[in-house]
Image (tube, rainbow, N blue to C red):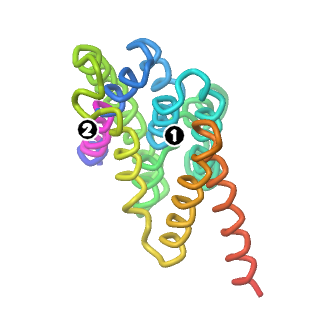
Amino acid sequence: MRAASIGVGIATGLYGISFGALSVTAGLSIWQTQVLSLLMFSGGSQFAFVGVLASGGLSAVPSAIISAWLLGVRNGFYAIRMAPIVGSKGWRLGVAAQLTIDESTAVALSRETPEHSKRGFWWTGVAVFVFWNSLTFVGAYAGKLIGSPEQYGLDAAAAAAFVGLVWPRLKSVFTSVAAIVALVVAVVTSIWLPAGIPVIVAGFVVVALVNIYFGKAKV
């Protein structure tokens, strides 16, 4: 189990190199990047944050925060599912909350017994946290040495990385249609709305689609 968890941690941590490099090319310093990674610790949300920041600069910070929050909401649902399994109290509860991510939840739920699920959660969560943040620093330092992101095409890499994270999740007709609708809305509204706002508008459109879809499914 430990080997599997460490393997997941290393594989996930490698994405941290990309995030670190993209973050500094988006305008954050190495230490700002590191603090963001330590405290936010949610890959999709972090990529969304630096992606919006790269397109709109400091004026897009509020939009970047909202975009990151919308993507991080899923961790709250993970916490509801994992709470009975982890069963932590006191200061351990805060640590468990920070480690409740896609990978730790997936490994925990794949185990056959409650005890193994609990161990899988902790081992995977800690492994991902260590490797993700360590390699984020490596990526941020490397990104600082690169210089101008436009010279290497990295100015568009944040968006590309985020698409790469989302693409494997489009497993049904509904999710694919929702993604296309969100893309169209974001592109069209970007003509007249400030940077970052189109992403939020597209997000609310998708939420409306989800409510309509599942509302009809219940009827």
Neighbour tally class for label 1: few under 14, some 14-19, many 20 plus, Cα within 10 Å: many
> Residue at (73%, 74%) from the top-left corner?
212
Amino acid type of disc 2? Ile
Q: Is residue 173 left or right of residue 20?
A: right
How far apart marks 1 and 2 lie (CA) works out to 19 Å
* Location of residue 128 (image quadrant): top left
Q: Would residue 151 appear left or right of 210 to someone viewing this image?
A: left
In the image, residue 191 sits, relative to residue 63, either above or below, namely below
Q: Secondary structure at mark 1?
A: helix
Foreground of the two, 11 or 137: 137
Q: Quadrant of residue 142?
A: top left
Type of amino acid at the residue the image marks with label 1:
Ser
Q: Nearer the viewer, mark 1 or mark 2?
A: 1
The residue tagged 2 is 10
Task: Tell me the residue at 48%/18% (across/down).
Answer: 35
The residue shown at (49%, 56%) is 114
Q: Residue at x 44, y 39 (%)?
A: 43
Q: Does label 1 or label 2 sit earlier along the sequence?
A: 2
Q: Which residues are magenta?
A: 6-17
Residue 67, image x, y percentages: 60, 41
Left or right of residue 116, residue 216 in this image: right
Q: Secondary structure at mark 2?
A: helix
Q: Which percent across, then down, holds residue 213?
A: 68, 77
107 horizontally vs 6: left or right: right
Q: Say if 33 sits above or below 47 in the image.
A: above
Is residue 139 covered in magenta?
Answer: no
Q: Is residue 217 above or below residue 42?
A: below
Quick one: quadrant of the C terminus?
Answer: bottom right
Q: Position of residue 1 (x, y in %)?
A: 29, 49
Magenta span main SS: helix
Query: Residue tagged by mark 1?
Result: 45
